[in-house]
Structure formats: C-alpha cells, structure tokens
Image (tube, helix red, strand yellow):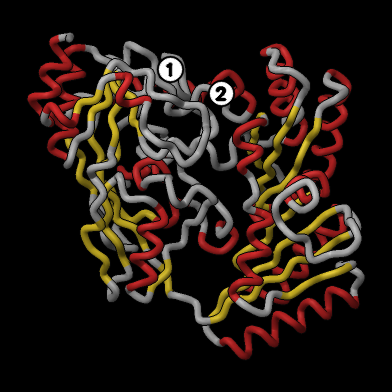
C-alpha cells in the first residue's frame, strides 16, 4: 500500500477507497470500454472531501481522473495504473428545486434521469436529454457540455447552467453558485469548467435553469425521398411550427434498417423502405391548438411533396415507440467506431458522400450508419469496418475528420475531445486558440494532475 492511498483512506474513510480489483467489479450501464485501471477509486461525499483529495494529490503530483457514469464515447475517463480515480456516486443529492425561481441545485453524482424526474415532480421541465440519461451524472454531462435531442429548442447544457461549484487542482474551491439569469458581476467563471472535460477543475455542484413544463406533446415519424428534401422540410418545420419545434432527428436508411426489424429490435410503422427518416417533435401549452397546428403542418408538407409517408403518434406509448427507433444505439456503442461532428446542415449531404467514398475506398466492407440532430447541425456517424486492426480504425478516423476541412466543420459536436480526438483538434481550432487553452491548463493545473493527457498535451 502506498502512502498516498493510506492518506486518502484517512480523508474519506477506508471503505470509500477501492483498490483496482474492487473498482473493476462495478456494474456499468453502458459498455464504453473504460474499465477502472487506477490504483485506487476514491469516493468522496461532499465538496470538502474533494478539495482535500485534490490538495493532497497536487502536493504529491498524483494524477487524478474524474470518474462518473462512464457514458462518454471519446475515452475521456480512461485511467491507467498510476492514476487515482474519483467517483461522485456518494455526492448524489438534489439540494433544492425552486419552483418559483425555476432552478435546481444538484450535486455532481446526480444522474440526469433523477434530475428530470425531480423537475417533473415540481411541475417543471429539465431541458437536457440524452440516451444515457439513466447513467450519466451531473458533473460529467456539464463538464462535457452534453447536447442531445432538445438542443434545437433549449440549447446545449451550457445554456441551462446558471452557476456551479468546482475544485481546482490544488484544492481551491471556486463556488460560483449563481441563481440569476442576469448577473454581469465580473467574469462568468463557470464557463471555464463547462465543456472542459475535467482538465481545468472538478465540478461538484451545479445550479440549473429549468423550463416550463409543456402540456402538449406531438411527435411524428416521416419519410423523405432524399437529403435535399430534408433541408426543405427543416425550413418548413421552422416556419410553420415556430418555437414549439423541440426535435428534428434525422436517420438515414442504414441506421434505420439496423434499428428496426428484422435486423433490429424496434417495429417500423412503414411498409416500404425510404432513403431518409425524420422525427418531428413539438412541445407547447395548448393541447388542442398545438395538435391542430401540428397536423395542419404535416398536411402542408405532404402538399409540398416534402414527405413521402408519415405516422403521427396518438398516445404516449406511440411517441415512445417512435423515439425508441432513434434511441436504438447500444449496438453502435459496443461494436462500432462512433463519431459526432458539426457542420452546416446544407453541407451534410455532400460531406456524407465524401466521407463514405473515402472510407469505402480503403475499407471496402465497411458499414456506415448516419443519424443526428440536424436541426442543430449535429451529425452522428457509426462505422463498422472489417477486423479489429488498429490501422483500419486510424484510417476511418482520418477520413471522418479530414473530410470536414473543406466544410470548416467541428470534430466534436457534443461528445468532447477526450483522448480519441486530441490529435485532430487543429482541424477545428486555430494554433492561437490551442495555445490559449494550454495557457489556461498550465495556469490552473501547473502540475498537470487533472485528467492528464485528455483534450490537450501540455
């Protein structure tokens, strides 16, 4: 037993410091291949203990990896035998839900699903939603600035955070627990930690801005003949549905066939195959009027030849069944190389042609599935290439990211950089931007102990 592990046990209790074997036995809801290889997994119960842990590790130049729900897809929580991993499972309290101010204060270990359920119980709506809601934790999805299916209306996680508390590498607690929409009192320090993937500080508590709970919810699955038609459909949806539009999810045929029977588990409501499928969703406060407007909009879309076929959900179950097709991603997470990029919606079709041609030229047997949140410029891509050769994976990565260059696209829309995308960061960020990121990192973490090697090399 090393001295630092003995000291960590004194700080948080012997039962809250797990060795490597015990840590690896934890049951994970998502298989993202990030087993805990650290020499110890430490489980603090409050911000004070996190501060004490980091102060000790800073003094000892001991590397620390924040270890949350492990649902990320870019190796942002990968550990090695020299690391200490910090889990936030014991910091799982929702401290306050203020129905009048429409805010929620939650500790880092609260899952997204618990936050959603608590908001719903208070008659409010938690605006961030991703498929891993049952496992991802507040600290993780804030530190990665998660996106999800409601971004077109509510924005990214960053747009829903009013304030937060974080601990710096040396144990200093930065408590910026703002609860106001308007607060221009100096620098907005929370922005340093949102989306920085734990390399600048460890998030311990967050104040979220909640939204009004909708009383109407309309969902339709529509089929289109090609991607240019999808672009026209998006313009039409914005024009006719306005601010009630809360979801515009696109699935290309390759993804749809994998998700629905006979290949997948979900039922397709269509008898004939189509090239592209779109989930349209609106949320509002007048059930009768909103349903009439939604139906009228779809009728207009048919008249304008934007839609080849469509089904409108008539119940909560039918809404869930439609969304279940889009949520059928477990086979991708476990078996494929997964990518998320951003580029102008008008360029997506051209990019798909470019990257498909490049990948299939070098990997003739590759299967590529495209899907994404096209209402907010986000395209997801999953590639199943022959074999497990690392060279094949590198070839696929290179094509996915380098094909973005002509379109000035972003290598990460919502999953972050982690280890996986680090070497491609220069495609989306200028040398000056990367230099400033490194300056921030070395200033706030001079010993490079926080999630070292992720996002940047310093």
Q: Pinpoint residue 326: horizontal percent, then vertical percent.
A: 67, 54
The N terminus is located in which quarter? top left
Image disc number at residue 368: none
Residue 116, above or below 442: below
Specify whether residue 175 is in view: yes
Image disc number at residue 453: 1
Closest to the observer, 192 or 288: 288
Residue at the spot x=81%, y=27% of the render?
A: 366
Disc 2 secondary structure class: loop
Q: Pinpoint residue 430: horizontal percent, then vertical percent.
A: 57, 26
Q: Quadrant of residue 356?
A: top right
Q: Is residue 141 left or right of residue 309?
A: left
Image disc number at residue 420: 2
Closest to the observer, 336 or 20: 20
Disc 1 secondary structure class: loop
Closest to the observer, 271 or 200: 271
Specify whether residue 192 is in view: no
Q: Residues within 10 Å of mark 1 (few under 14, many from 20)?
A: some
Count up the numbered dots. 2
């Amino acid at each position: 037993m090393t001295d630092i592990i003995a000291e960590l046990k004194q700080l948080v209790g012997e039962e809250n410091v797990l060795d490597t074997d015990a840590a690896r036995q934890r049951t994970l809801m998502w298989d993202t291949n990030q087993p805990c290889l650290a020499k110890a997994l430490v489980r603090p119960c409050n911000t004070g203990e996190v501060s004490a842990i980091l102060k000790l590790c800073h003094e000892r130049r001991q590397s620390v990896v924040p270890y949350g729900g492990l649902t990320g897809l870019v190796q942002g929580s990968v550990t090695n035998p020299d690391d200490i991993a910090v889990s936030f499972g014991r910091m799982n309290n929702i401290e306050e839900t203020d129905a009048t101010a429409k805010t929620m204060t939650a500790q880092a270990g609260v899952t997204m699903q618990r936050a959603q359920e608590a908001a719903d119980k208070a008659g409010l709506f938690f605006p961030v939603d991703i498929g891993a809601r049952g496992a991802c934790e507040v600290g993780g999805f804030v530190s990665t600035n998660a996106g999800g299916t409601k971004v077109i209306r509510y924005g990214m996680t960053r747009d829903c955070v009013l304030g937060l508390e974080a601990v710096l590498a040396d144990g200093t607690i930065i408590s910026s627990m703002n609860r106001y929409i308007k607060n221009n009192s100096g620098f907005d320090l929370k922005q340093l930690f949102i989306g920085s993937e734990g390399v600048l500080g460890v998030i311990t508590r967050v104040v979220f801005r909640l939204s009004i709970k909708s009383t109407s919810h309309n969902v339709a699955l529509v089929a289109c003949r090609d991607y240019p038609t999808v672009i026209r459909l998006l313009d039409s949806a914005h024009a006719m549905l306005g601010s009630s539009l809360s979801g515009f999810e696109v699935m290309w045929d390759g993804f749809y066939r994998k998700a629905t029977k006979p290949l997948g588990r979900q039922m397709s409501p269509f008898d004939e195959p189509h090239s592209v499928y779109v989930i349209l969703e609106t949320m509002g406060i007048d059930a009768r009027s909103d349903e009439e407007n939604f139906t009228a909009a779809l009728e207009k879309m048919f008249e304008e030849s934007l839609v080849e076929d469509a089904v409108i959900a008539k119940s909560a179950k039918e809404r869930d069944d439609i969304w279940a097709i889009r949520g059928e991603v477990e086979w991708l997470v476990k078996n494929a190389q997964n990518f998320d990029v951003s580029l102008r919606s008008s360029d997506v079709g051209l990019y798909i042609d470019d990257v498909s041609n490049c990948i299939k030229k070098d990997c003739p047997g590759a299967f590529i599935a495209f899907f994404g949140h096209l209402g907010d410029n986000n395209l997801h891509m999953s590639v199943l290439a022959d074999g497990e050769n690392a060279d094949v994976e590198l070839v696929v990565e290179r094509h996915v990211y380098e094909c973005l260059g002509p379109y000035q696209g972003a290598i990460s829309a919502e999953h972050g950089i982690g280890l996986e995308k680090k070497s491609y960061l220069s495609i989306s960020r200028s040398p000056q931007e990367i230099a400033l990121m490194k300056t921030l990192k070395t200033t706030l973490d001079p010993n490079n102990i926080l999630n070292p090697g992720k996002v940047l090399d310093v």
